[in-house]
Image (cartoon, grey):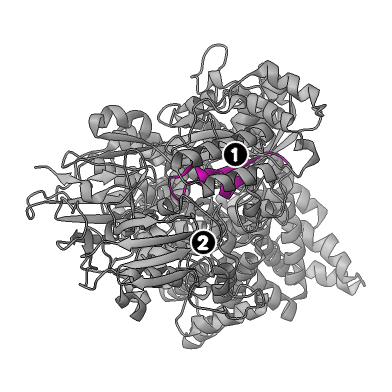
Amino acid sequence: MKLSKRSTALIVGGLSTAMVLAACGGGDDDGGSGGAAGDGGSFSVYIGEPENPLLPGNTNETEGGQVVDSLFTGLVEYDNETNEAAFTGVAESIESTDQTTWTVTLKDGWTFHDGSPVNAESFVDAWNYAAYSPNAQGNSYFFANIVGYDQLQAGDDGSQPAATEMSGLRVIDDLTFEATLSSPYAQWPTTVGYTAFYPLPPAFFEDPEGFGEQPIGNGPFQAEEPFVPGQGITLTRYDDFGGDAPANAESVEYRVYAEQDTAYTDLQGGNVDIMDTLPPDAIASAESEFGDRYIETEQGDITSLGFPTYDQRFADPNVRKAISMAIDRQAISDAIFNGTRTPATSFISPVVQGYRDDACEACVLDVEEANRLLDAAGFDRSQPIDLWFNAGAGHDAWVEAIGNQLRENLGLEYQLRGELQQAEFLPLKDAKGMTGPFRDAWIMDYPVAENFLGPLYSSAALPPAGSNYSFYSNPEFDALLQQGNSAASDDEAIAAYNAAEDVLLRDFPSAPLFYRLNQGAHSENVDNVVIDAFGRIDAAAVTVVG
Amino acid sequence: MTDQQQADLRHDEMEAGTTTGLASPSVDVTDARQNSLWSDAWGHLRRNPLFWIGAVLGLVFLLVAVFPQVFARGADPRSCSLSNSQQAPSADHWFGFDQQGCDYLANVVYGARNSLLIGLLAVLVVLVLGVVVGAVSGFYGGLTDTVLSRLTDVFYAVPFVLGAIVVLQSGVIGRGVVAVAIALAAFGWMTAMRLVRSQVIAVKSGDYVAAARAMGASNGRILVRHILPNAVAPVLVYTTITIGVLIAAEATLTFLGVGLQRPAISWGLQIDAGQSLLRTAPHLVLFPSIVLTLTVMAFIMMGDALRDALDPRQRG
Amino acid sequence: MGRYVARRLLLTIPVLIGASFLIFAMVYALPGDPIRALGGDRPLAPAVVAQLRDDYNLDDPLLIQYAKYVGDLLQGDFGTDFRGRAVLDTITQRLPVTIRLTAVAIAFEAVIGIIAGVLAGIRRNGFLDNLVLVSSTVVVSVPILVLAFVSQFVFGLQLGLFPISGISEGWRSFLLPGLVLAAGSLAYVARLTRTSVAENMRADYVRTAKAKGLPHRTVIIRHTLRNSLIPVVTFIGADIGTLMGGAIVTESVFNLPGIGRAVFDAVRQQEGAVVVGIVTLMVFFFIFFNLVVDVLYAVLDPRIRYD
């Protein structure tokens, strides 16, 4: 899904960070950690400059997402340990008999920060707004499986959408509404915990622009002042919070830093309390420097080497498996990533239910078997293979390492094709333009196994509609996925998803490579800092000590 | 390299263009005088140690660029193993290994070719553009001159590196050696143009030009036979220095991620890859930096010495 | 003088328009689809893409787009980037950083450059003269990229004298990048001063002054310096505009959030409005300082008269 803009910040930050480590010194102590203020104290958190106004429907990167998450609470929340949906949010229940028509019942007593009640309309209106294409909300596609979404999209000829409200959403009473999906999806209740699905108060529709600077949410913290570009925003605890776990601290300051390593210096000097991500060069030393204040979390993502299944040269699954088996994932993680990548063993991330740690046999280095497969497939080794990735995002080194391993293990020459920026690279992927294996990366939208399968490999997700850049299409896989989506229980669903994954493992449209580990750290002024699989800090849980 | 290079371009224009004695029309083109200028200059050059240091350095790098395998101590720059990643220099591997586990000496040595190639190609384009536009502008004057001069101003006002970045980013001309050379030249020809233009203007009113015209010589003949030879000296100085400047600019563009691409071997790519590992493996930045600096210095020293030799006023 | 300034101002208009159009056309020619990149690996809904393309006039032909842009610009509207942020906000937020960097660089350039040049020029071929000559050759030869890393490594990391990156320590943060940015010009100022001082030392009026029996010191300060510094001052003035437009590398290596960094980032993300806005500003500065210098020249040197 979305590219965090950090990926670019990381590269630029590179060296300077290295030096910051040694040069770090004290600094003034008037940072954001004045523990004495109020009863709960206050703390500060590093963020990069958010890319968009702070609207749930338009926030799809980590920086703004962190702030929006503190300001809003959705229907469900995700358990920090298991990543399963928990009904600690606004929803009392989300039920269905056919996995298609879902009845959402809300808890009573939740209010927005301006005092207006959180009711069924708060959700339905917000979702319709985000889905309506003239509003140009980046998260619009999250609603695409609700009946009537198509009528909210402008035509190709620029004509206005036929409707402003999705016919699949129906308010039943103040605390109940119904959502009808275009096809069964048993995991739907889990998806609605994502940022895009947050409710909006009536005040939003009066002034969307002003709202984006100073949002009125229903979460544990409220914004008493607008967001200041380049500086940040301070949120205070919302005392009438409807949930069971109100914020521990009195206030939190999200401080915008242009550079990650400047923030890291501040963290070392105790001038900022929490960083949810660390500069790459600091990782090697951060663990010993911060001790138990160093936090490493598995991320819900996967990096793969996609194959152009439309290219005759890579049409044989054995060729694709051979290439995968010639890659020593652990060696690359150690040499290039400082050990912060876990070799992938499945198409599914370990943070979600349905992950199997031994699913992918072709993900294990086996040079002999790789050569045998390649010969059996009659692969022409005299031609170099192109390795594609997007430019300017720090992918050169690891893709080159893969190329070197292919040459060493398979005797294949390689050509790096990393000259295109995303703006050009993505359209080329959409247009079947890859002439060799390519970087494919995915960060989960919500913690369900299906999110690692459907959006990447189903026929419905073929570009331009989705992200199936391998152009893999197999009715058997689609049917098993559908079976999982319609399953009545989680166990049944996961069994079906695993069966679908087995089809993928057989056909091998892409080679799973790595899962990312996220590194964060915090100062001595705070405790109970949890960073979830989305890389976000649970701000309400943070306690200020001393 | 915007900062320094742009400044340098300006400097060279000021030194070579406006202040050299050669710009004044008193210099005649009679063969005898020309000869005395050059032999005089050579005599001066011979005694300048800076020139010899520069010339020897330049020659060494030229040899490295042409025969890299001789200097790589038998190592293949593309034979790499991650198990050697970032190893420090040793007796067997003088420059150690890079992040990919490739022999670094071999990589640095093989990087010379691209750097020199880009420097020479770019300077060639700069010369052609500069001489043609400058000569036309200065010789014909009037509206032609006004239009071409304003056009030059436009290019001059756009920051050098920025212009090259956009050209390369557009991908129209690709991202290889030739593309980088063209991009550099496209925003680096203006000083040469101004140099040539001012020389042409200074010389064209001279008596011998009038004489040639009176004898029925055509415009083209006057330009090529009488005027251009006079402009050679300052342009030569400028060219020598500019090769160094352009080599550094190539490294900068590549460092910024818009120049050469891996797996091409270039000093800019090596510095770029090494910068994030400076704490753990400082040699990865150190070696290409030193070699790059020495190369640039070779050309600037030669250029400096040449200027001193050709410009009597600069002599002590 | 007034007429000269007016004429020069008029001449800057075509250059300003030409440069902004040049850069606009080049950004326009950049391949790919910036809106597509906004969504990242997950495509935005097609209708959303269409809406955004329309919002930013991306489907208009080049000349129409440029005309719309200039039209907005004349009303003080620099446009917005693809995140909906006003370009003017970006500029006002980042320009102070670049201005401070340039100011520090110019200060280094003037102070160190002139002192070194005067010391070298007073006694030609002396030890100081040769030292300045050789060291300026070395400094000019070191690519700014290398200079930046070496100074970060030595002064920031090993010696811990300066902050290595970022702007969190106020003016101190600008010392190292300022010195690096100034280095090339500094070496040139030293040489220019040296040549100029040496020439003036041989000039008739200095000989006259010496013959009148004025003290050596007075001759140097009152007579030689005043005249030899004219070309130096004008060079430094013109350099302000060059440095402001040329800090991309310095700002990148030292992580200074100035306009150089902003414009580089914008090129890569194809943020046309940001690129054109900032470059136009840089071009303006460049032209402006060159104009100021020419006028200054006339004021300082009575031999020059513009009519």
Q: Which residue is mark 2?
A: A181
Residue at (67%, 54%) from the top-left corner? A430
Q: Chain of mark 1?
A: A
* Residue A322 painted magenta: no
Nearest the viewer among A79 and B6 is: A79
Element on which disc 1 rests: helix
Secondary element under disc 2, as helix, strand or loop, is: loop
Tell me where residue A303 appears, x and y as whole percent: 54, 39
- Residue type at mark 2? Leu
Residue A456 falls within the magenta-colored stretch:
yes
Q: Which residue is mark 1?
A: A500
Left or right for A190, reference B135: left
Is residue A19 in view? yes
Which residue type carries mark 1? Answer: Ala
Vertical position of residue B185 compared to residue A26: above or below? below
Segment tinted magenta in the rendering = A436-457
